[in-house]
Amino acid sequence: YIDLRVELNPCTLDEFPCKNRQCIPLLQVCDGILHCSDGSDEATCQIRPGRDLSDLELKIEPSNREAHFGETVDLRCIAAGPQGFKLYWSRADGGNLPANARQTGDLLRLTSATPENSGRYICHTDFYGQSSHTTAQDYIDLRVELNPCTLDEFPCKNRQCIPLLQVCDGILHCSDGSDEATCQIRPGRDLSDLELK
């Protein structure tokens, strides 16, 4: 006999769950004021209002990025220094993140990238204290290019284009080998078990 209990978090994504199951706005965490009646919103904070954040450093990996149309792009913001703050992603032009962008913690993922996703992305943290507003940030310039190949060509991962007929023929035509990397059928293979539908 096993007694298994699962407790769901009652808070929304923009709320902090206090240990006593109370929910408070995320902006009230680590602001130097107790908002949770149990004090859990201030218990593990390394950053306090008025503290100098010069030792906080944000770095985006990779440091620069070129992507191709349709590719999934992952950008990660790495924080070195004190903890206890939330990271935010935004576009440098002040616009909203694109509809195909999702932020999960320090990761910004753009699925099915398009040229419209090109531009400068900023990872930053804002700390609002009682008497100060401090921010740390880093940025990356992303360029999403259309496929350089024609419809009767295969785009190698290194941006080389080869005729479609040379893909999966058992001979490396792309200098990076991407034309043979994911082939299920190879020359000389017995195809008697192949079933066409």
Image: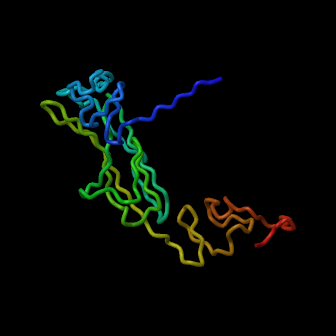
| 41 lies above or below 104 | above
Residue at 65% across, 64% down = 179
Which quarter of the figure is the N terminus placed in?
top right
Residue at 49% across, 70% down = 147
> What percent of the width, then of the height, locates residue 124?
29, 43
Q: Nearer the viewer, residue 101 or 117?
A: 101
> What percent of the width, then of the height, locates residue 159?
53, 65
Q: Nearer the viewer, residue 161 or 29?
A: 29
Which residue is the extreme one toward the left? 131
Q: Seen in the image, is 173 located left or right of residue 73?
A: right
Residue at 43% across, 52% down = 109
> What percent of the width, then of the height, locates residue 65?
42, 55
Q: Quadrant of residue 172?
A: bottom right
Q: Quadrant of residue 17?
A: top left
Q: Seen in the image, is 65 located left or right of residue 31?
A: right
Q: Quadrant of residue 167?
A: bottom right
Residue at 73% across, 62% down = 184
Which quarter of the figure is the C terminus placed in?
bottom right
> What percent of the width, then of the height, locates residue 50?
17, 27
Q: Seen in the image, is 19 located left or right of residue 69?
A: left
